[in-house]
Image (tube, rainbow, N blue to C red):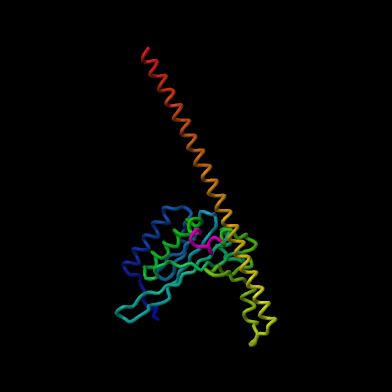
Amino acid sequence: MSKENYRMSEPELRSIEMLQSVARETPTIEIVIMTHESIKVRLRGESMRWYSIESNFQGMNGNSTRSQPEWSIAVKAGRWQNDVIHENEYSVNLCLHSKNQNLPIGDRIVSLVLALFNDIKTALKIPMLAQFIVCHRQMLKDIVIFQDTMIVTHDMVEDEWDYPEEWDEEDMSHEEHEMHESIDEMYDLQQAWEEEMHELEQAQRQQEEAEEKKQEKEQELIDFWELMADKLLDK
């Protein structure tokens, strides 16, 4: 995989221009790094959580006639802006990727930026993101990464290196118990998220109803004064 003399192609440069345009139009989206081999974007989502998307050029794949640039993409997330900036113990990894890996890198980053900018709506389709959104900051300290099927904690990573070559029944039952506990925690997080989404929808519906009533009263007042004006004109 070659990294020598790499320069972005025209489609890649156009995709980068689109990314820059999205960042210019949205104050909560910031391009931190922008070079031919490294891109980093930081943003705040609708849920007030913070995200960092970092992509680095890895090299050219394929033969000389059909070589394609390969980029790595990593998504960091945190409750506070400083958690993401400093990538401290309260920042976590999100296993998120754009659907079409063949798109130019700018397009792929833009799709992630828009998904995370509207993270509450995106969370309706991606339970993993919902679990992160409802997770308390202190809980994030124990988590390494949110994946589609499970949450990986620091304890799970550390224990991975201590597994014996042969398992006995007691070890297996202990691991199964821990796995069940992790699943229970995920269900609890999912339930908490559903409750939060229900409260948000309820608050939004109440706000819309209040706005509608306000407009109705204003229209009634306008109609009343128009009627009074017509009566005065008739006299």
Classify 180 as above or below 80.
below
Quarter where residue 151 is shown = bottom right
Q: Is 45 on the left or on the right of 63, as rendered?
A: right
Total marks shown come to: 0
Residue 71, percent across and down? 42, 72
Question: Which residue is at a point 42% across and 26% down the rendered structure image?
Answer: 223
Q: Is residue 25 magenta?
A: no
Of residues 137 and 26, which is closer to you in this image? 137
Question: Which residue is at a point 39% across and 15% down the rendered structure image?
Answer: 232
The quadrant the C terminus occupies is top left
Quarter where residue 174 is shown = bottom right
- Secondary structure predominantly adopted by residues drawn in magenta: helix
Of residues 33 and 231, which is closer to you in this image? 231
Q: Is 95 on the left or on the right of 64, as rendered?
A: right
Of residues 98 and 64, which is closer to you in this image? 98
Q: Seen from this angle, which residue lies furthest left?
A: 65
Residue 6, percent across and down? 37, 74
Q: Seen from this angle, which residue lies furthest right?
A: 170
The quadrant the N terminus occupies is bottom left
Quarter where residue 55 is shown = bottom left
Classify 74 as above or below 115.
below
Question: Which residue is at a point 53% across and 62% down the rendered structure image?
Answer: 129
Residue 168, percent across and down? 68, 85
Specify the segment rendered in magenta.
123-130
Q: Is residue 125 magenta?
A: yes
Residue 24, percent across and down? 41, 54
